[in-house]
Image (cartoon, rainbow, N blue to C red):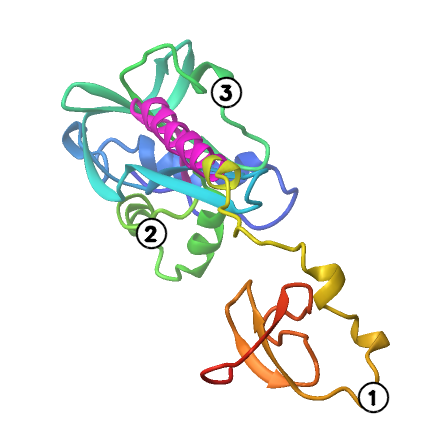
């Protein structure tokens, strides 16, 4: 059966863009669908949830894998079959579990009947075939079926998961982990910090503001009771704490900091 050649760019109707693909898939003796089997490379499918803590202002993202990219073998594959109340372009089986493929382009969207499907234990993938047109145009020898085979079996371009039976469970697990992280951030912020036991009764009598300190002030020995730094000098301001409010005048020091 002859394959339909790519049409020239004329009216822009999307039906012309999918004609080659439909004709190739419906050919009874073509390579991809021979003996009712179809090799199909599925894309990677992961679910991510994220949030920003109102306590710590940190942002956290959790990503969990639902399905790895791999080459599937669909058995009993059929073209243009009724599935979940609508027609899908390809329907096959993986270990007796239905696996549907729906072809999309700019003017052909995934129908709501398969998003999600009525059958819980199944898989649904959409293929956007817009990139296929450019691939056909690059083929000068007319081996369009080989271009199609590579697009289906070797590439994940344009493919996306519409439904996976494990997706809901994985999403719940990710959401639980995210809630746990948010609870941890809340606990960190609400944890009481230990405050040093500081006697500031001396401040009115023993500490003078640097603004009112006389120029002829002699050097004295100081110690900061906040960071325990000690020094000898004219200024009572602690360099580490950048303040003089916790400085005490002492009789002597063993070293300078």
Q: Which mark is residue 131?
A: none
Classify 10 Å Cα crowding around label 3: few (below 14), some (14-19), many (20 and above).
some
**Displayed quadrant of residue 83:** top left
Please report whichever mark, 3 or 1, sits nearer to the chain's N-terminal start: 3
Is residue 12 shown above or below 214? above
* Residue 229 locus on image (x, y percent): 52, 74
Helix, strand or loop status at disc 3? loop
Which of the two marks, 2 or 3, is nearer to us in this view? 3
Horizontally, residue 122 falls left or right of residue 220, namely left
Q: Which residue is mark 2?
A: 147
Give the residue drawn at x 35%, y 60%: 141
Please report whichever mark, 1 or 2, sits nearer to the chain's N-terminal start: 2
Front residue of this view, candidates 181 and 203: 203
Is residue 192 shown above or below 176? below
The stretch of residues the image draws in magenta is 159-186
Front residue of this view, candidates 143 and 48: 48
What separation in Å lies between label 1 and label 2 (alpha carbons)? 89 Å
Please report whichever mark, 2 or 3, sits nearer to the chain's N-terminal start: 3
Which of the two marks, 3 or 1, is nearer to us in this view? 1
Q: Is residue 31 visible?
A: no
Helix, strand or loop status at disc 1? loop
Magenta span contains residue 178: yes
Q: Give the total number of marks visible in the rendering.
A: 3
Q: Are marks 2 and 3 in contact (CB under 8 Å)?
A: no
Q: Are marks 1 and 2 in contact (CB under 8 Å)?
A: no
Classify 10 Å Cα crowding around label 2: few (below 14), some (14-19), many (20 and above).
some
Q: Which residue is mark 3?
A: 111
* Residue 161 locus on image (x, y percent): 39, 33
Q: Which residue is mark 1?
A: 215
Helix, strand or loop status at disc 2? helix
What separation in Å lies between label 3 and label 1 (alpha carbons)? 86 Å
Is residue 132 shown above or below 213? above
């Amino acid at each position: 059966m002859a394959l339909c050649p790519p049409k020239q760019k004329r009216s822009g109707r999307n039906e012309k863009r999918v004609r080659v693909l439909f004709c190739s898939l419906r050919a009874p003796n073509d390579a991809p669908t021979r003996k009712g089997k179809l090799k199909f490379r599925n894309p990677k499918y992961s679910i991510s949830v994220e949030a920003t803590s109102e306590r710590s202002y940190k942002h956290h993202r959790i990503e969990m894998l639902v399905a790895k990219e791999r080459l599937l073998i669909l058995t009993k594959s059929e073209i243009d079959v009724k599935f979940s109340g609508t027609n899908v372009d390809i329907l096959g089986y993986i270990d007796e579990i239905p696996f549907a493929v729906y072809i999309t382009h700019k003017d052909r969207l995934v129908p709501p009947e398969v998003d999600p499907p009525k059958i819980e234990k199944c898989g649904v993938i959409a293929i956007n075939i817009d990139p296929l047109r450019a691939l056909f145009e690059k083929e000068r020898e007319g081996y369009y079926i080989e271009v199609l085979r590579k697009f289906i079996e070797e590439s994940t371009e344009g493919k996306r998961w519409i439904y996976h039976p494990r997706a809901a469970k994985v999403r719940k697990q990710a959401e639980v982990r995210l809630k746990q992280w948010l609870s941890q951030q809340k606990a960190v912020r609400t944890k009481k910090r230990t405050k040093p036991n500081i006697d500031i009764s001396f401040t009115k009598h023993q500490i003078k503001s640097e603004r009112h300190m006389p120029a002829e002030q002699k050097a004295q020995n100081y110690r900061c009771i906040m960071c325990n730094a000690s020094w000898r000098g004219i200024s009572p301001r602690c360099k580490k704490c950048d303040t003089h409010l916790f400085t005490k005048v002492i009789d002597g020091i063993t070293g300078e900091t």
